[in-house]
Image (cartoon, helix red, strand yellow):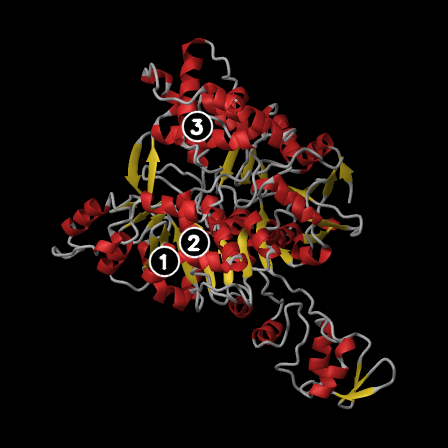
């Protein structure tokens, strides 16, 4: 395959693609930013050419919105992102400078980054993740470009690494269109820091038309771990008790997902303290029957199989801790054998479920790696390499024991499947450092393999037993609909992604459950509001697909319930400050009986109840349970800034006319913090006010 510099590759694209260039770039991390920038800048200078970019999750450094946030973010962003190459088209899109001959269509936006951008909102495409490849083919995509990984031990191959998700689903259709005479270019940019992932993610280098040089070495985009709040930890603890040992786990992203991971790790590593905390939170007392039926509190004896569109750092932590260790095998016969105990955790035969061998079963076991290749079958006898013979009956304990030196591990065992990955720099480093054996058990694959049951459905059903699809939302209505992607006014926060796919799977799989995590309340600019609403003018998940909702106060099992039962279940896990107004709204709509009263035990859903638990169980409420990119002072400052943001609008602080704040700590007590923010010696009224506000926030959050 020919190698090209960036400019040579752009020349070739312009020369070979006649008409509009329809460029597909991977979601998130896998974009070859330098190539995308070179092509974009060339097209900007050629108004007669047209460029349409189809992608999702175009990533950029966080944009601080106030001066205090800017003071905090500057040094941190420089340290974490280093020489990361930003996307030129994204910068122009944010500034409203996108040229008329360029269009950007995304099906998932960097969360909350484009709320105020009409052009991005107008160009957003609402799609299930599993439908993206289909629609890109219909749009006539004619160039795809992405980062790949190289391994000198695998000459002639490349790894799609972080993004096999859509590419693997696109390739068959692209081949058909090429055979029909269309010109399509596939461009690979090797990156030195991308982990080399094998299996489905590994392709012959000939799948690509151009290999860009030199190898890219700029800092990979990362998403630092953000703090996990007390509210999030309480949600995660409830979720952890709904996960059944021996089952399947899909997990979304964000602080609530990190909290769920932390709770699952505690369930495995420190079960006594974990169960004591559950009891202190009244979780078994209130939801014990549901937990016994659907989940558990014990450590994981059999382990979980992970199947999640995003392979995130939390899943890797669960994998390394042995929580995720139930293998998925590449064919149904192997999977059935494993389910009946015929394979151990390493994928070796245990002697259970075996029978006499015939020619077909003998060849199959050798092909699967379970029997050594040097064995032969002759007239119902196994011929050993040393000339010995054994009856070809593996159900005979003596025969099975004698075969021990000739038993191997099943090929293709995977502990977790993922479609793409994104996370902190430490996560990428850990993936690079994994042993080859453990990395082989991470199956980066096509999104159609993960997000849908269609295609090899019998095998998927065997693998995905007792599946728990755990995702988040920001509002739930009292009738069970939920929103996770869009505001009521139509503005898109992020995208549907795979949430609908997973909720639908939960209803189709025997033993499957969808769990939506929800913070029951939020505070913004000093205003506290409920995230459980009577109604909301948008739904990501309609109420006919309602299942389980978890807040920091408990679990609402909504599946198969009447509307009145759904309302009562959600009232039980709502914040008590809002329960009365919710009850009134439901009664006015005729959905609750006039004499309905919420039981007194659910009238104590207040944040104060949770504060005491953090003091008693500090190790189970760690602010950064999966690691931290912030220094000690930065952790304090971030906590203070978040507190200020919840109480005031930081962008309007100076206009508030706050002349003084009282009862502040001595500035000398926070000298390092103030120096980090450039406020150790404030100049002028504005900086004096900022120093006072910061000291107030540091004092208010000093307990962490």
x then y, percent, for residue 60 = 55, 32
Q: Nearer the viewer, residue 458 or 383?
A: 383
Q: CA distance from mark 3 to mark 2?
A: 28 Å
Residue 523 seen by the camera: yes
| Secondary-structure class at tag 2 | helix
Secondary structure at numbered mark 3 = helix
Q: Where does the image place residue 556, in percent across and percent down from the top left? A: 32, 57
Residue ID at (45%, 40%): 494
Q: Does residue 102 appear in this view?
A: no
Q: Earlier in the sequence, mark 3 or mark 2?
A: 2
Q: Quadrant of the C terminus?
A: top left
Q: Are marks 2 and 1 in contact (CB under 8 Å)?
A: yes
Judging by the rendered image, the residue that carries numbered circle 3 is: 698
**Secondary-structure class at tag 1:** helix
Q: Is residue 373 above or below residue 433?
A: below
In the picture, residue 351 is in which quadrant?
bottom right
Image point (56%, 29%), residue name:
89
Q: Which residue is mark 1?
A: 283
Q: Which residue is labeled 2 in the image?
A: 237
Left/right placement of residue 282 relative to residue 640 reads left
Mark 1 or mark 3, which is nearer the start of the sequence?
1
Residue 341 position, x and y percent, is 59, 76
Q: In front: mark 3 or mark 2?
A: 3
């Amino acid at each position: 395959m020919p190698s090209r510099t960036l400019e040579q590759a752009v020349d070739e694209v312009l020369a070979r693609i006649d008409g509009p260039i329809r460029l597909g770039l991977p979601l998130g991390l896998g974009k070859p930013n330098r190539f995308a920038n070179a092509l974009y800048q060339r097209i900007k200078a050629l108004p007669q050419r047209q460029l349409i970019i189809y992608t999702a999750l175009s990533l950029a450094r966080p944009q601080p919105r106030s001066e205090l946030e800017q003071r905090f973010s500057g040094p941190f962003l420089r340290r974490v992102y280093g020489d990361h190459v930003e996307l030129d088209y994204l910068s122009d899109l944010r500034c409203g400078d996108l040229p008329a001959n360029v269009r950007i269509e995304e099906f998932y936006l960097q969360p909350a980054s484009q709320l105020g951008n009409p052009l991005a909102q107008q160009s957003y495409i609402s799609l299930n993740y599993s439908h993206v490849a289909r629609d890109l083919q219909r749009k006539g995509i004619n160039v795809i470009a992405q980062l790949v990984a190289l391994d000198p031990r695998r000459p002639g191959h490349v790894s799609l690494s972080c993004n096999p998700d859509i590419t693997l689903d696109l390739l068959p259709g692209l081949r058909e269109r090429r055979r029909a005479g269309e010109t399509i270019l596939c461009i690979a940019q090797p990156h030195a820091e991308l982990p080399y992932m094998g299996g489905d993610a590994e392709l012959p280098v000939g799948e690509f038309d151009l290999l860009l040089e030199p190898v890219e070495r700029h800092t990979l985009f990362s998403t630092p771990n953000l703090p996990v709040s007390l509210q999030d930890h309480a949600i995660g603890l409830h979720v952890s008790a709904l996960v059944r040992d021996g089952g399947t786990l899909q997990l979304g992203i964000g602080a609530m997902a990190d909290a769920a991971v932390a709770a699952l790790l505690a369930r495995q590593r420190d079960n006594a303290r974990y169960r004591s905390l559950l009891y202190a939170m009244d979780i078994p007392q209130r939801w014990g029957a549901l937990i016994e039926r659907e989940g558990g509190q014990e450590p994981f004896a059999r382990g979980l199989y992970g199947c999640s569109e995003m392979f995130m750092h939390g899943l890797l932590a669960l994998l390394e801790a042995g929580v995720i260790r139930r293998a998925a095998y590449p064919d149904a016969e192997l999977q059935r054998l494993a389910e009946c105990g015929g394979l151990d955790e390493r994928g070796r035969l245990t002697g259970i479920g075996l029978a006499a061998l015939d020619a077909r079963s003998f060849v199959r076991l050798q092909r699967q790696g379970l029997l050594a290749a040097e064995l032969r079958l002759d007239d119902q006898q196994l011929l050993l390499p040393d000339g010995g013979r054994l009856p070809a009956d593996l159900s005979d304990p003596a025969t099975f024991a004698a075969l021990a030196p000739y038993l191997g591990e099943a090929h293709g065992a995977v502990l977790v499947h993922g479609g793409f990955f994104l996370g902190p720099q430490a996560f990428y480093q850990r993936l690079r450092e994994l042993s080859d054996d453990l990395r082989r058990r991470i199956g980066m694959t096509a999104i159609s393999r993960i997000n849908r049951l269609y295609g090899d459905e019998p095998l998927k059903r065997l693998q995905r037993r007792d599946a728990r699809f755990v995702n988040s939302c920001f509002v739930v209505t009292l009738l069970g609909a939920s929103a996770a992607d869009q505001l009521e006014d139509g503005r898109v926060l992020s995208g549907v992604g795979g949430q609908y796919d997973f909720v639908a799977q939960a209803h189709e799989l025997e033993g499957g459950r969808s769990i939506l995590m929800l913070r029951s309340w939020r505070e913004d600019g000093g205003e506290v509001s409920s995230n459980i609403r009577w109604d909301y003018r948008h739904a990501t998940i309609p109420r006919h697909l309602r299942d389980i909702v978890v807040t920091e106060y408990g679990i609402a099992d909504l599946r198969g319930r009447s509307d009145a039962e759904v309302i009562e279940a959600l009232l039980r896990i709502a914040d008590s400050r809002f329960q009365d107004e919710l009850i009134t709204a439901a009664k006015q709509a005729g959905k609750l009986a006039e004499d309905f009263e919420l039981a007194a035990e659910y009238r104590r859903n207040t944040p104060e109840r949770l504060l005491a638990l953090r003091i008693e169980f500090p190790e189970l409420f760690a602010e950064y349970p999966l690691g931290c990119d912030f220094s000690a002072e930065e952790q304090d400052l971030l906590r203070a800034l978040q507190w200020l943001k919840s109480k005031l609008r930081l962008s309007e602080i100076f206009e508030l006319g706050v002349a003084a704040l009282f009862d502040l700590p001595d500035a000398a007590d926070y000298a390092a913090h103030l120096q980090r923010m450039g406020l150790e010696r404030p100049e002028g009224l504005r900086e004096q006010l900022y120093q006072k506000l910061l000291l107030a926030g540091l004092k208010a959050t000093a307990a962490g």
